[in-house]
């Protein structure tokens, strides 16, 4: 029965409805927590909207530029060092919350983008250039250099294992 | 040419339609988790044993959600409260690389198997990175 409902309205909407139900329960049992959460949601929405516009614009451009034939040729060929380095750099340079990038990655995955490159991209989002001054101030330059180096290396290891275990 | 734009617009709108409920749901869930867990609670998870604490650091970092700046701010506070650097490092790395709260969204949009494997590997990577960081720093 539940499975039928999920199939009918879609897992995406079931997820949102479940969260809205959680908020309804919060409103009934803890009004302060409800207000705090709503205010935080408002702040996050203001923060992420510009990123979301960029991500959907990129999705639109990807849909124009990457026709199925071109995508097949570009994204499904054997991955080399250049693709890995590109995924690392794009991951480091991308901004905004990680989940904002899921729609674009999902679209590219449908066109044939490998899981390993997605995993590398997502892992490198841990390397935050805007926060580097803050990290040096609190933990020192050696800490920044060592953790950044290790995170880049582990992003590649992560990509390798994700590809291996997802057979992609 | 016009057909190409028409198809691209249609595909993008379909993408927006299927991802917006998930993204909005994740934002609501993150806001709820952040509001219910006070940052002062984090320090209560640590035992003083570096190795065990790196594990707890990774667990707390994986569950915690929000802006990465917060992970560093909370990390500094934990460090000031004598939580070991190994635990703080595991906490900071897992905060950004592992997403328990974002898992439903990652799972729905990128595949359940992909999300599960990526998060499990990232969780253990955070512990290994923390241990290696401390070892390397001792030699610098």
Image (cartoon, coloured by chain):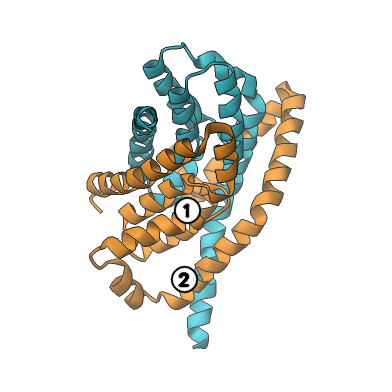
Chain colours: A orange, B cyan
Counting from the top left corner in percent of width and height, residue B25 is at 59, 43
Q: CA distance from mark 2 to mark 1?
A: 20 Å
Counting from the top left corner in percent of width and height, residue A165 is at 24, 44
Q: Is residue B90 above or below residue A112?
A: above
- Return the residue found at the far bottom: B1
Subunit of label 1: A
The image quadrant where one finds the C terminus of chain B is: top left
- Return the residue found at the far front: B140
Name the residue that disc number 2 marks. A62
> Does dot 2 land on a helix, a strand or a loop?
helix
In the shown orientation, is residue A75 left or right of residue B78? Answer: left
Q: Is residue B128 above or below residue B21?
A: above
Classify mark 2: residues with Cα within 10 Å, few (<14), some (14-19) or many (20+). some
Viewer-proximal residue among B55 and B14: B55
Find residue A92 and name its label.
Answer: 1
Classify mark 1: residues with Cα within 10 Å, few (<14), some (14-19) or many (20+). some
Counting from the top left corner in percent of width and height, residue A107 is at 44, 62
Q: Residue at x 61, y 32 (%)?
A: B73
Residue A24, by quadrant, is: top right
Viewer-proximal residue among B79 and B68: B79
Q: Residue at x 22, y 47 (%)?
A: A164
Q: Residue at x 73, y 44 (%)?
A: A42
The disc, 2 or 1, on the residue closer to the chain's N-terminal end is 2
Q: Is residue B91 visible?
A: yes
């Amino acid at each position: 029965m539940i499975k039928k409902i999920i199939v009918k309205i879609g897992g995406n909407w079931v997820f949102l409805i479940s969260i809205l139900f959680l908020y309804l329960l919060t409103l009934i049992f803890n009004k302060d927590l409800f207000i705090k959460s709503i205010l935080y949601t408002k702040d996050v929405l203001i923060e992420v909207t510009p990123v979301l516009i960029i991500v959907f614009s990129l999705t639109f451009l990807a849909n124009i530029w990457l026709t199925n034939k071109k995508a097949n040729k570009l994204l499904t060929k054997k991955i080399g060092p250049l693709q890995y380095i590109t995924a690392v750099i794009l991951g480091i340079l991308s901004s905004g919350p990680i989940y904002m990038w899921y729609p674009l990655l999902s679209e590219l995955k449908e066109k044939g983008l490998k899981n390993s490159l997605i995993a590398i991209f997502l892992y490198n989002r841990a390397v935050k250039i805007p926060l580097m001054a803050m990290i040096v101030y609190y933990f020192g330059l050696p800490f920044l250099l060592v953790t950044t180096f290790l995170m880049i290396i582990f992003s590649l290891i992560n990509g390798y294992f994700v590809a291996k275990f997802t057979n992609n | 040419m016009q057909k190409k734009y028409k198809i691209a617009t249609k595909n993008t709108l379909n993408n927006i339609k299927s991802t917006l409920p998930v993204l909005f749901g994740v934002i609501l869930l993150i806001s709820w988790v952040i509001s219910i867990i006070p940052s002062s609670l984090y320090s209560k998870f640590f035992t003083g044993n570096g190795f065990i604490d790196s594990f707890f650091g990774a667990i707390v970092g994986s569950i915690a959600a929000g802006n990465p700046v917060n992970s560093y701010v909370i990390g500094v506070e934990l460090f000031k409260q004598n939580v070991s650097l190994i635990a703080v490092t595991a906490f900071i790395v897992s905060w950004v690389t592992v997403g328990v709260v974002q898992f439903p969204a990652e799972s729905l949009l990128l595949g359940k198997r992909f999300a599960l494997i990526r998060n499990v590997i990232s969780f253990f990577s955070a512990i290994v990175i923390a241990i290696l960081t401390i070892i390397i720093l001792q030699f610098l």
